[in-house]
Amino acid sequence: MNQVCEVNIDSKIVKEIAKAYSTLDYVPKLRNLLNLVYPEKKTNKFCKLDLHKEINNLLLNSYEGEPILKYKLFKAFANRDVVAAYEIKVKNSRVDFLTVDDATTSFEIKSSLDNLTKLSKQSSDYVSAFDFNNIVIHERHLTKCLEIVPKSFGIITVDQDGYEIVRKPTFNKSTDPSEQLNLFWYDRCR
């Protein structure tokens, strides 16, 4: 694959690309998106697959939004013997990522681009449904997060360099069995 060279990338442009990009896009749109970042590079020789690879690499390395954190969570669990899901309704919230094996575990993601306005309500909803709960946050949210989430929640901070487990989750004794069963109803997944 012909990789474009590394350049300093404007985070606002990367954010625009993240919003506009779709895996279903055609070659002209993919070239236009890449040309926002690499205007001096000619992408004319890139096939559709190479264009997608370039954009994906750009986003993985330069974008700090929720989709990237979801992808990294997926990768962390990809080779484990668990059932995992994205965006499942829990009461009046939507958990970003969950796993089910011997226990149910939630992961709520708050990227550097997010705010924490709904976190109190979300964590309250998740306590009713999951044996273990985690918040995956950009390090800039740590102080505020510690004030909001219950002490039983695990806290994982992330940045471009990796992650740090600030606190491991403890077993939640407040689950509601009917709320746990509701996670698996088809209508709740829509």
Image (cartoon, rainbow, N blue to C red):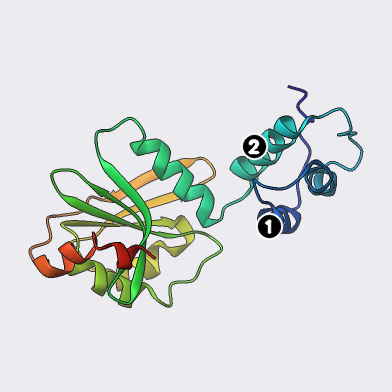
| Residue 15 image label | 1
Mark 1 lies on a secondary structure that is helix
Q: Is residue 112 above or below residue 3?
A: below
Q: Quadrant of residue 8?
A: top right
Which residue, as the protein is rendered here, is positioned at the far top?
1
Q: Label 1 vs label 2: CA separation?
A: 14 Å
The kind of residue tagged 1 is Lys
Q: Which quadrant would the C terminus be assigned to in this image?
A: bottom left
Tell me, yes or no, if residue 14 can be seen here. Answer: yes
Q: Quadrant of residue 5?
A: top right
Mark 2 lies on a secondary structure that is helix
| Residue 159 image label | none
Q: Residue at x 83, y 49 (%)?
A: 36
Residue 138 drawn at (x, y percent): 47, 56
Q: Is residue 36 left or right of residue 142?
A: right
Q: Nearer the viewer, residue 177 or 36?
A: 177
Residue topped by disc 2: 57
Residue 141 drawn at (x, y percent): 44, 64
